[in-house]
């Protein structure tokens, strides 16, 4: 009897896994189809909301906490829909658009299946990094005609969500709100500067989707901040041995992107604007 019960549980577990995989693949393909055939982001965003139905499937007093807990996934999902729209409306040939959107969809499905469900700290930090990078890339791609205040608020929201996501992977939640808001303020200032001077780099096979220099630098700063907090959490102080190499890497990256590359690629004194290097 026990063996039969065990086999039933295993079969049910395997079936649940198959259904889970199929639903996530179907979600990615449905978002792709919604953008490709409707030429609009509306249905794609509706699918994002529908996929997060469990966030609101509780009493209203828990909605805010659930939304905060799911902000990173929401940022990644919304960014995916917007980036699909950007690629679909690019000057690519039909085959190039489908290839680019297919690659992006495969990456999103990989996010849903392999990275998003994991709860170990290293994976939660990686989730926050993906949301920070992809969220800011998408924000700057769409916000070049927006008021600067909206861009700053958008960057601050991404900063708050990713910092909170990282900090909640630690046992100490005493200063999560304060540190998350502080990080949001830091990135907001960075976003304000980036709004007025942004250099962007094209991606192979996705030249319509530009990567802003600011996104790379903010991701590097986020990694340095994480290493500093992790050192403080474990040793009650920020040890130089824990942050020296990340600090040198970030300084080198800043020098390379802010000094060396502009000297190489900018052929005039005024290099401001959203430039495809």
Image (cartoon, helix red, strand yellow):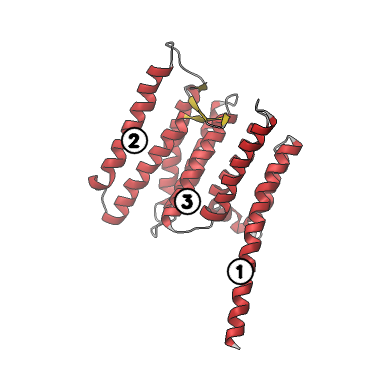
Where residue 223 appears, as percent x and y from the top left, is 38, 43
Q: Residue at x 72, y 43 (%)?
A: 33
Q: Residue furthest front?
A: 95
Q: Position of residue 110 (x, y in %)?
A: 56, 50
Residue situated furthest bottom in the rendering: 1
Q: Quadrant of residue 83?
A: top right
The residue to which callout 2 is attached is 250
| Mark 1 closeness class: few <14, some 14–19, many ≥20 residues within 10 Å | few
Instruction: Find residue 57 and report its image quarter.
Output: bottom right
User: Is label 3 in a helix, a strand or a loop?
Assistant: helix
Which label sits on residue 28? none
Task: Give the camera-side residue of 192 and 234.
Answer: 234
Q: How many marks?
A: 3
Q: Which residue is mark 1?
A: 14
Q: Residues within 10 Å of mark 3 (few under 14, many from 20)?
A: many
Residue at 33% from the left image edge and 27% from the top image edge: 255
Up the image or down, 25 lies above or below 78; here it is below
Residue located at (50% from left, 58% from top): 118
Q: Residue farthest to the left?
A: 240
């Amino acid at each position: 009897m026990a063996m039969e019960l065990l086999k039933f549980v295993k079969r049910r577990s395997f079936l649940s896994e198959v259904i889970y995989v199929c639903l996530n693949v179907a979600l990615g393909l449905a978002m792709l189809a919604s953008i490709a055939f409707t030429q609009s982001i509306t249905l794609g965003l509706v699918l994002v909301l529908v996929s997060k139905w469990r966030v609101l499937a509780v009493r209203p007093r828990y909605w805010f906490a659930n939304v905060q807990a799911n902000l990173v996934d929401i940022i990644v999902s919304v960014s995916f829909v917007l980036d699909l729209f950007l690629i679909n409306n690019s000057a690519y040939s039909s085959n190039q658009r489908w290839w680019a959107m297919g690659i992006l969809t495969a990456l999103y499905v990989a996010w849903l299946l392999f990275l998003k469900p994991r709860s170990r700290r290293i994976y939660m930090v990686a989730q926050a990094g993906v949301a920070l990078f992809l969220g800011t890339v998408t924000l700057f791609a769409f916000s070049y005609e927006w008021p600067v205040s909206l861009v700053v608020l958008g960057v601050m929201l991404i900063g708050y969500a990713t910092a909170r996501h990282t900090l909640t992977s630690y046992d100490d939640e005493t200063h999560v709100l304060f540190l998350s808001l502080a990080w949001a303020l830091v990135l907001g200032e960075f976003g304000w500067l980036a709004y007025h001077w942004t250099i962007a780099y094209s991606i192979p096979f996705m030249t319509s989707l530009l990567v802003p220099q600011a996104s790379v630098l903010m991701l590097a700063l986020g990694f340095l901040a994480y290493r500093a907090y992790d050192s403080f959490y474990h040793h009650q102080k920020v040890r130089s041995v824990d942050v020296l190499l990340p600090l040198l890497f970030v300084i080198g990256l800043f020098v390379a992107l802010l000094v060396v590359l502009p000297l190489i690629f900018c052929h005039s004194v005024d290099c401001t604007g959203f430039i495809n290097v």
